[in-house]
Image (cartoon, rainbow, N blue to C red):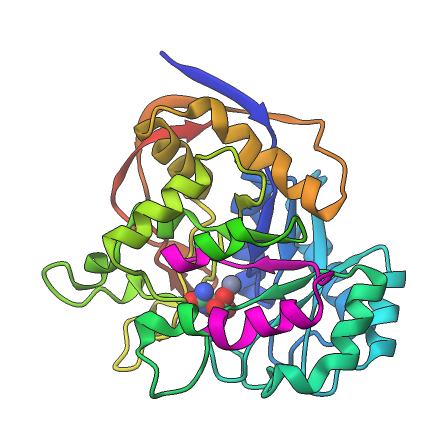
Amino acid sequence: MKLINIIKPDDWHLHLREGQILESVLPATVKSFRRAIVMPNLIPPVTDVEMAMTYRQDILNACPGECDFEALMTLYLTDNTSPADVKAAADSPYVHAFKLYPAGATTNSASGVTSLPDLMPTLEAMVEHQVPLLVHGEVTDPDVDVFDREAVFIDHVLSPILQALPGLRVVFEHLTSRQGVEFVMDAGPNVAATLTAHHLYMNRNAMFSKGIRPHHYCLPVLKRETHREALVAAAISGNSKFFLGTDSAPHDRAAKESSCGCAGMYASPVALELYTQIFEDNDVLDKLEGFASLFGPKFYGLPVNKEQVTLKRQEWQVPSVIPAGTEEIVPLCAGETLRWQLI
Ligand code: NCD
Ligand code: ZN
């Protein structure tokens, strides 16, 4: 029997939702992760410190039993976010970043940014106060092929902004492409990226395996195998610019299994186990702790966790659905057998 111990990881990109879904999904996160960067794409979005504090309290209230989980809050960047909003976020010990959703890019992004260059004074305030900008790195132009939207975002949006503001702290969230990996590697130490377990585990064929697989649809969309290989190479490289962020994004089963199914995979119940499996497949289990537990706190300037978790090499079957009140959520790897189990 094989066991591995690592410092308890953090999830640097997580959607927790609200109400019944929040209550149903939080236990899976709390089990594997000590802290999480919580995404603000609620309806209405979390746009100021006061809203973030209310949402944080809702999360704490939903925490199961004795729970030392820490919700690291983020604010949703809009066309109206001002330099004063940035200062208020910097002054709050609970708010850790702004999240950029290009308007229309993904789930609940309608209030997102229509033109990033128009937000220059706000971005300058982020540099001044050293507040990170977390980016959903895709252009929304319908003329750009959906598989190319990340690469085009780098060339047309992110590169020019970083050229103008070389001190801007950026986390390129849920990186999905070879171009993205190269961009982050070549950028300064102020630019990092999160990697999801599902983008490391699957390529775009998973969306079309013997039929259309709505539970494998997320944004940015899964890409070709060559991109997945670049992501795995980055994750296992030991380069501290790349760290764990599940982008666990639960949706009710009916909203996914629909004629216009929404984007997002519910990854939390399997994410840590899946990352472990991927690191084992590449013979680098010794690199898991850096990726999962050390590099994120280093970028965010937060202490490393004191707790440990143990993973056991023991097969288990992922449930096919997870109940969420009157709804149900299909988790990532539903019905599959995984090799590592958190104990
Ligand atoms: C996320 C969601 O459902 O909130 N969906 C997704 O496909 N990842 C939003 C996002 O991170 O793009
Ligand atoms: Zn996300």
> Is residue 290 highlighted in magenta?
no
Q: Is residue 201 above or below residue 103?
A: above
Q: Position of residue 113 (x, y in %)?
A: 61, 83
Q: In which quarter of the image is residue 219?
A: bottom left
Asked if residue 328 lies left or right of residue 211, the reply is right
Q: Can residue 103 be seen in this view?
A: yes
Q: Is residue 246 above or below residue 161?
A: above
Q: Is residue 73 above or below residue 231?
A: below
Which of these two is toward me, 239 or 210?
239
| Identity of the residue furthest to the top in this view | 1
Asked if residue 299 lies left or right of residue 24, the reply is right
Which of these two is toward me, 8 or 78?
78
- Residue at 25% over, 58% down: 224
Q: Position of residue 174 (x, y in %)?
A: 48, 57
- Residue at 37% over, 42% down: 232
- Residue at 56% over, 70% down: 158
Asked if residue 130 lies left or right of residue 287, the reply is right
Asked if residue 151 lies left or right of residue 116, the reply is left
Query: Split into 4 quadrants, where in the image is the N terminus?
Result: top left
Q: What stretch is highlighted in magenta?
A: 153-180
Q: Quadrant of residue 38?
A: bottom right
Q: Position of residue 240 (x, y in %)?
A: 58, 39
Q: Position of residue 293 (x, y in %)?
A: 60, 34
- Residue at 41% over, 46% down: 197
Which of these two is toward me, 234 or 68?
234
Q: In which quarter of the image is residue 81?
A: bottom right
